[in-house]
Every structure is written in structure tokens, then in C-alpha cells.
Image (tube, grey):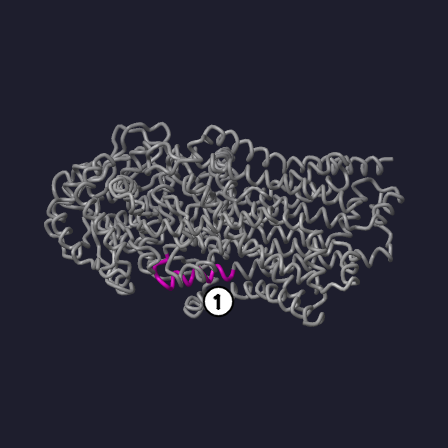
Amino acid sequence: MRAVRAAGAALGGITMLGAVVAAQTVQINGAGATFPTPIYSKWIDEYAKARPNVRINYQSVGSGAGIQQVSKQTVFFGASDMPMTKEQMQAAPGTLLHFPTVLGAVVPIYNIPNVTAELKFNGQVLADIYLGKITKWNDAALAKLNPGVTLPSTDITVVHRSDGSGTTYIWVDYLSKISPEFMKRVGVNSSVNWPAGVGGKGNEGVSGLVRQTPGSIGYVELIYALQTKISYGPVMNMAGELVKASVQSVTAAAAEGAAKMPADFRISITNAPGKGAYPIASFTWLLMYESPKDKAQAKAMVDFMKWALSDGQKYCAGLGYAPLPDAVIKLEQAALGRIKTS
Amino acid sequence: MIGTARRKLVSSLFVAFCAISVLGALVPLGFVLFFVVAQGIRSVTIDFFLQMPKPVGEPGGGMANAIVGTLMLSGLAAVMAVPIGVISGIYMSEYAGTRLAALVRFAADTLNGVPSIVIGVFAYGVAVLPFRQFSLLAGGFALGVMMIPIIARTTEELLLLVPGAMREGALALGATRARAVFSVVLPAALPGIVTGIVLALARIAGETAPLLFTSFNNRFFNTDPRQPTAALTVQIYNYAIAPYDDWHRQAWAGALVLVTIVLVCSLLARLATRRLERMHAR
Amino acid sequence: MTLRSRDLGFRAGTGVFALALLLIVCAIGFELVRQSLDSIQRFGLAFWRTELWDPVAGEFGALPFIWGTLYSSVVALMIATPIALGIAVFVSELCPAALRQPLVFLTELLAAIPSIVYGLWGIFVLVPAIRSVEVATPEALRQLPLFSGPPLGVGMLSAAVILAIMVIPFTSSVSREVLKSVPAAQREGAYALGATRFEAIRAALYYARTGIVGAVMLGFGRALGETMAVTMVIGNNPKVSMSLFAPQYTMAAVIANEFTEAADPLYLSALVEIGLVLFIITLLVNSLSRLLIWSMARSGIAAMTAEPPARVAAA
């Protein structure tokens, strides 16, 4: 009996202490895209060294979940690779602002046993694979793009996202621009009705599945392919060049978009024109309310964003993301002033 | 005679089948435990218990926050479930013939069978949405709801096992119902009830689904009940479906810790039950 | 206060807590219905016949999930039931007394292992093994719809195997209890008439058939609601398919994967409606199972006085 009472007192004490300690630190919860998770977690780690009393808890649950949670206000900020639709923005209980944070690329990853050469892709082939029209690796269209590579007759296992994903949005946005059939049958959204394939949860799930399934193809953010050392191939861009995803090619893709950046920062840069531009690139955004209820959290987040837009950008290249163009950063610093911190 | 020989053959085959089917349980058990121990033992280091997760892709780090989170979630669940469970159990055993007792028994058995994901959906609607906050409290609530029926039924059954003579003796000496139960019957059944609570705790410590949308997850160490928190099971899940080998290692280590906790609790419960049976047999 | 009023106080006091338990169960049902009203009104009964699950177009049909749940649970039962009954028979009738306790303990240990650990083991050990089995399946079999499709490893077969392992201890332990309650007279009568072990046990099993069906249904109910282990190995593809190799989806898995991101209220409502149906199905299956087991226990007590002769197989 005494032991039970002691345990109860200890638990109560820890909980109260926890609440008291928490009162002094600012804890901010955010959730959303898995696409930028590697750079966000690096930023949060580095920022925590500079400001130890601010704790930003970012959960990588997918852009769809990020949009939903921030609309329901169960988290303070959301993150998404897909700009919110007008309907979604209207459904939210306040004005949600988009702030681009980094530029990233979505790459086609594949796992074909005994093929070590780099496979080349173009939009039409990728669209047909994901439509279920190209079913074997040694299909004529793939062979034409890859002369000299012996492709096996294995079935292609298509891997896509099972959760609502901004990475999916970037992927289908690009494929729909290339293939009208894809646009019609699948459409553009964070969660689509896939004609074929297996679903993985998050960028992590897709790369995990591709890694373990021989003969599979998937799409993930560049850093996931780099960190897990999965093969990924170059894609043909609008100018007809075969471009592999890299900091330079993504920056080239953003050049035109940066020049035409709208005031609300919602823009798509897939299938960008220009030399050396990688065709499946995108901005990724943090979503915050213009007039948030918790002013302390708002102040801390604005400070974090300012840090991310200045010091934070230097961590991008090391993780495979491209830093934002200067013009965009200037516009954002100004836009951050819209958030009411008092 | 041929008929007898055939019957004997069939019987021997049947006996052989039953013996082999035991392997059908032992082999998967052995397989699972073997892999968990083999893969996990290398990664269960002091770091694992003391360190926080490192940023995505960087090797190292541990699950300190998740382990503490699981302990706190289980503690909160117990705080909620033990009073309701034990006292409901007392009602069901003392007033066993009433309609309410029958209804509550049915409700407890039903609740026991509700899939944990459905309980998670319920807890989201009741404990997360109205407060617009994922929290330790919501997670503890979901787990507590799962614990209540286990504790209630265990308490009821154990109280019914206490010999009627003890209860009648207390009443004959002039005690009120309440006195009889709390001073005589309950203490007699207490070891068994505590065993039941320990088993229930072991069971919910291994739950993942109800935590996915209640306590959510947290990269950092959290003791504030109003904030989301990491949990061992959710962390294992996130690491398992990721592509990083280092995270897979840590997932196995987490699984080893979890299985060890469950095993130890089951063993303790077994020993306790054995001692109780011997005590009552006298 | 008088003794009587204190007793009433005790009854009321404990009764309140008991009522709380009852209210929680009602609250679950109520909350599920409340949140799924949108979807129920919009789609009606067609929800259960439609195969299309398209969050983009706002078209939701739950058929793939019901199919996946039922298919995986039924196949799991087909694998698990013989094994579980075999274990129950062995432990209660055939094994030496010294082995009994350890075997029972080990079987129950299977039930104690958390679902997430099964899932982890499933991803890294079972799926590659099943993939090798799928790859090794002869071409002739691969033509059948039951075995068609690319050998992914993840899919219905992996899910069914993992569910079977998880269900075995439940069915087995309840069957054991049921067999224990078969009056000794049944078996003794059979042996007296010259039955082999198999025939005597068969008589006991026949006698206990209601309870055993109840035990099997209990396992079924468990399989229906299993979430984590299944979602990690089933492939998460909302398509109805006959093939054991095909990636499919279950009700519990889709809720776990898509709940936190259903941004659209109709989407969320559709998911909760799936949860509601899961709740109702498991409620019915579990209640039925308990009814069967309970009626078995009752008739066991009644039959001890009747002592019908045991059935013996004709030579």
C-alpha cells in the first residue's frame, strides 16, 4: 500500500514538475511533409543550440496530415510540398500563410538486380509506368531511352505513397503536365487513386519498400535516395536534356519561378523551362496562421523562420536541397512581418 | 484385424499431428524471439537508454524520450483505469445477480474486444479535438480505456474466488457491506488483483495504434501532460518503415526492450498466480 | 448513518463506477456514429458495395477494405485453427503432466508479444521469406487467379500468416478450457467401448463443438481488428483481388494510415464510418463467440447428470 502511494506521489510530482518546467520553455508543435524532414530536423537541432528555451517538435507525417492538423489547429504550424487549395484555405478557421523554406527534387528510384548502369527516364515513360501501361523493365520505350543496357524481363513493381503526400503532388503534377492521359485518369492531388502498385508510408516507407523489393520503382525526395544509397536516374527536361537532380539543376529550375513569384508564394515549378533545369523540382512551404492565438509561440516561430532563411540556408546543400533564391528570401522576410506576434 | 490396425494408424497420425502442431506455435515464437534478441542485443547500449534521437539520417542517438514516454503513458493509464476497474469489479462481484452487473459484465467483455484502432479514433474525438492538442493525457486516456475491462473482470473473478465464509464472517460480526469488502475480501484478493493490473500494464505498454492520433510523437523529452509525447511502440513503428539501417537497428533494440518488459511481467504474474493457488489450496 | 443506509451508500458508490464502464462503451458507439453521420448520409448503403476509394474526387467506397479484412482473417483462421486445436488437444489430453505448464506458458507468450514487434519481424523476416516462396511458385500455379501477380512479398499471404500466428494462442487457450469442461464420463465411456485415442478425443471434441466454434470465432474477432502487424506487411493497396500475392488493404490499416491526414471532413467521416463498421462487426463476432462458449459451459453442467454414451467409430 505504501509503495503504491509513494509511486503515485512520485508520478504526480514528475507531472507537476514537468508542467512547471514546460511553462518556462516555449514548446511548438508542427507536423507535415516528409520531403523536407531531413533539413527541418537539422535546422531544429542547430536552432536549439542557439535558443535552448524554444523546443520545436516537428513530426514527419505527410503533407496531407500537415494541412489537416494545422487546419484543425492541433499543431501550431504545418508543412507541405503542395500549396493548399483555395477550398482548403477557406475551410481553415483563419488566414493561413505559405512560407517557402527550401527547394527540393523528387527523383525516380529503382531497384533492379544485376543492373548497375544508370537508367534514363522521361516524363512519358514514367507516366506510362505509373498508369500501369508499361509493365516490364525490358519494355520498348525504356530500352529506347537506355541503349546498351540489358534490361531484364522482370515485372515492374510500382511503389507509391499510401499517405497524403506533397511529394506525390509534385510527382503527379509533373506527370500530368507531360501526359494528358495521366491528368485525366489520375489527376493532381496529395492523395490520388493509383492505377497500380504498392503503397509505402512517407518518403521513408517508399524508399524502404523499393530497397527491399527487387524490380521496383518509386519516387522520393533526393536526400532519401542519397542517404540510403538507392539508384536514381536522370529525367529529360523541357529543353530535351537529360538532367540528374542536384543542387545546381534544382536552382536552375527555380530561376523562372523566382522571377514570377506571386505574393502568396504558391507556385509550381515542375517541368521548368531553361537549360540545366531539373524537371521534377518544387518549393516546400511552412504554413502558419496570420493571427495565431498563442503569441509566444508566434514570436518564437517568426524568429526561427528568420534564422532558417538566413543561417539555415547554408545547411541545404549538404543535405541535397537547394537554397532559396535571394529574391524570394527578401520577399519572405517582408511577409513574415504579417504574422501578428503581439 | 485390418479395421483395428487402420483405426490405430489413424489415431497415431492424429497424435503425431497434435504434437507437431505444438511446434506450429513454438517455432514462430522461437523465430520471433530469436530475431528480436539477435538483432536487438547489439544495439541495446547505455546510449540507447540515455540519448535522444539524432536528426534524420545521422547515425547514433537513442530512445530515451520514448522509454520515458511509455512509462508516463502507462502510469497515467493506470491512474485512470485502476479505480474504475477495481471498483466496477467490486460492484460486479458483490451484486452479481443484478441487471446492472450483467450489463456491465457484457460491456466489459465488449470493450475488451474493441480493436485498439477504434479506441484511438474514439479518444481522438473526445480527448484531442476539443482541446486542439495532441497530448500525453489523450494517449493515457486511450490506453486507460483499454485497461479498464481487463482490470474489472480480473477483480470480479478474484473477488468471487474468495471463500464466502470470509465475507459472511465479517457481516456476521456486524460489519457493513463496505467494511466487509474493503477490510476482509479485498485484501484477500489483493495479490491477484495486483497481478491483473501488472498484466494489463504489460499489454498496453505494447500498444501502438491508439497512440498514433492521441499522444502523436515528440522528438524531445516531454513530461508536460498537455503536450505530445514519444512512445516506445510508435518510435519502433516510425523507425521500422524508414529506409535507414541505423534506425532499423534501433527499432530492433526497442523491440527487445519491449519484449523483455512483457516477458518479465508475464513471468512475475505466473509466479504470483502459482503462489496464490498454493495458498488457497491450503 | 444507519447500517442500511451505509450499505446503500456503498452500493451507489460502487455502482457509479460500474455505470461509468457501461457509459464508456456507449460513448464509443455514440461518438463513432456521430462522426460518421456525414458519410452515412452522403453514401448510404452504396458505401459497402463501391470499390472506388478516391480521396481526390471525394468518392469513397469501403469494399476493398471489407474484402481485405475478411479475406485475411478467413485465411488466417484456416491456417491457425487446426494448429490451435492440435495444441489444445495435445496439452489437455496427450502431453505428459510435467510438460503441461511450460507449454501453456509458452503458447500464452505468443499472445503477449506486442503487435508492433510482430510487424517489425514481419517486415524484415517474414516478407523476404514469403517473397522467396512466391518467386519459387511454379509457373503453372502462377496462372491461377489465386497466385497471380508479381512476387512482392508484401501482400495478403504475409498478412494472413502473421495474423494466424497472432490468433493461435487465443483459440488454443479457450479450446483448452472448453475441453477441460467436457465431463470425464464422455472420454471414459469411449475408452470403455474400445476407442482409440483419436476416437475418444473426437468424441470429446464433438461434445464440445459449440465451445470450440466459439473459440474459433474469438480468434476471428481478434484477427478482424488487428492493426499494426497487418499494415506493415499487407502492401496498402485498396483494390479487391483474389490473389494471395496481391497487396491489399484492411479496415484497420486504412484508418491507421490515413486518419491523421484526412483534411476533408467527408474523408474523415468516411474513415470513421469504416471504424464504426469494424466496431459493430467485432462486437457481433465476439458476442456470438462468448454466447457459444457460455452455452457450452451450461450444457456441460446439465449433461453431467444425463451421461449419454459416447460415439465410437464403426470398424
User: In the displayed image of the protein, which residue is found farthest to the front?
Assistant: C1
Name the residue beneath numbered marker 1: C33
Vertical side of C19 occupied by A36: above or below: above
- Where residue A209 sits: x, y (%)? 39, 39
Callout 1 crowding tier (Cα within 10 Å): few <14, some 14–19, many ≥20: some
Residue under mark 1: which chain is it in?
A: C
Q: Is residue B151 left or right of residue C202?
A: left
Vertical side of A325 occupied by B2: above or below: above
- Where residue A287 sits: x, y (%)? 25, 54
- Where residue C156 sits: x, y (%)? 50, 45
How many discs mark residues in the rendered view? 1
> Does residue C238 appear in the picture of this structure?
no
- Please tell me which residue lies in front, C57 or A326: A326
Asked whether residue C265 is drawn in magenta, I would say: yes
User: In the displayed image of the protein, which residue is found farthest to the right?
Assistant: C192
Q: Is residue C226 left or right of residue B15?
A: left
| Residue C106 location, quadrant | top right
Q: Amino acid at mark 1?
A: Val
- Please tell me which residue lies in front, B117 or A194: B117
* SS for dot 1: helix
Q: Is residue A106 left or right of residue A22?
A: left
Please report the residue visible at 61 percent of the width from the left and 59 percent of the height from the top.
B108
- Please tell me which residue lies in front, A72 or C50: A72
> Does residue A219 appear in the picture of this structure?
yes
**Quarter the N terminus of chain C occupies:** bottom right
Asked whether residue C99 is drawn in magenta, I would say: no
Q: Magenta segment, principal secondary structure?
A: helix
The span shown in magenta is: C262-277
**Quarter the C terminus of chain C occupies:** top right
